[in-house]
Amino acid sequence: MTEKLKRLKWKNFLNCVVVAAFTLVFGVLSLTGSLNGSSIILIERIAISILLAVSLSVVVGFLGELSLGHAGFMCIGAYLGGKAAALLDPVLGTGVLSLLISLLVGGVCAAVCGLIIGLPALRLRGDYLAIVTLAFGEIVRSLFMNSSDESFGGALGLETPRFDKQSLFIYAFLLVLLCLVVIQNLLRSKHGRAITAIRDNEIAARATGINVTYYKLLVFSVSAFFAGLAGVLYSFSNFTVQSGKFGYNYSIEILVMVVLGGMGSINGSMISAALITFLDVNLQTLLTGDMAVLKNFLYALILIGLVLYNNAPALKGFREKYRLRAVMERIRERKPDPSKERDDEAKWDRVPTKIDMDEVLSVSPLKSQGDETSEPGEEERP
């Protein structure tokens, strides 16, 4: 056990340590009443966005497939998990057990749908797969919107019990930790290498014996499972789940989080999800009334600025110089302290040599290159 701990690279799980520390600090602040309601709602939304962005990053960034139906998987988890919570509310209330059962129902149902939508992915790529996943999301949203009032609430939405807002975000970030551990261990294993090989060249991966069918279905199922968990958390953070929330625009927003964070970067997806959610919530708060129409405009300008910063060739040197890893490396560099430097204590007249200085000076000069015909030991002629 100790040898495994020594071989474990803790830097690979630094993001888990940061999330755990964040959860611990803000959990203590929330339980002591130091956080207001708006801050708690913001933290809940950040946790949900991180779950969505990291789970979609596996499909888009590591498998290399373009999916626009991630909001559909979240919709399945929100409605089915919320329905399970509503049925369990008279018996178990809104406790931890009800939350766990609802998470299991919503996540498993979304994973099954991910398995189903993964079947067309075996033959489709690029724009064609994007169209199929987009259609899947719209079909799911339409089914719940046109359902009866007794089943899923219809157009008015499904009424769900609200979990304790003082502690819901703690469970949300625990699920974020679970997502990070599962996905990062998957990607750093032989299965992760097979997934990235499919992304780089599917024909070559298939020729080397990689089961492309198995890994595509695996990735779609895992991604949909965590999107379903995010949907269940969304249902527990609101009193009503409406299908209009899970439209095409929300799938694009999740995809933007992944693209801005960097394709194939888990940490980048987390930072981008937190930043975009923070901007979205604050713009909704600042722009009210007639100014609310400017929210999407300012939001689009901010996204355009971020895209230009991440991709503009003229800013490449600035990005490399001030990126986080480069800054940390410069901080870790040890600069010499002038107060601790000492002069060389050696003295040239005390340096021992094998040949006396007088003997060195008495040696005759070397012959020029033109005297190549002279024999060794031959005396010089005047």
Image (cartoon, rainbow, N blue to C red):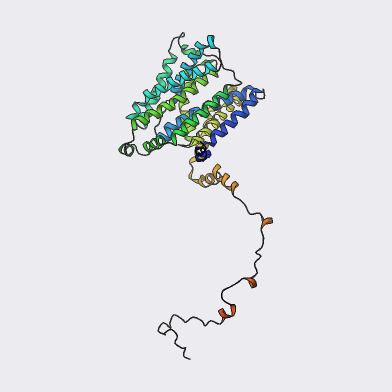
* For residue 88, above or below residue 45: above
Left or right, 162 with respect to 34, comes to: left
Q: Residue furthest left?
A: 207
Q: Residue furthest bottom?
A: 382
| Residue 155 horizontal/vertical position (percent) | 47, 13
Which residue appears at 57% of the width and 44% of the height?
328
Looking at the image, can residue 249 be seen?
no
* For residue 64, above or below residue 141: below
> 294 or 113: nearer the eye?
113
> 329 or 8: nearer the eye?
8
| Residue 153 horizontal/vertical position (percent) | 47, 11
* For residue 59, above or below residue 310: above
* For residue 151, above or below residue 47: above
Which residue appears at 65% of the width and 26% of the height?
29
| Residue 147 horizontal/vertical position (percent) | 43, 12
Looking at the image, can residue 117 be seen?
yes
Q: Residue furthest right?
A: 339
Labels in figure, total: 0
Quadrant of the rendered image containing residue 219: top left
| Residue 170 horizontal/vertical position (percent) | 58, 24
> 201 or 273: nearer the eye?
201
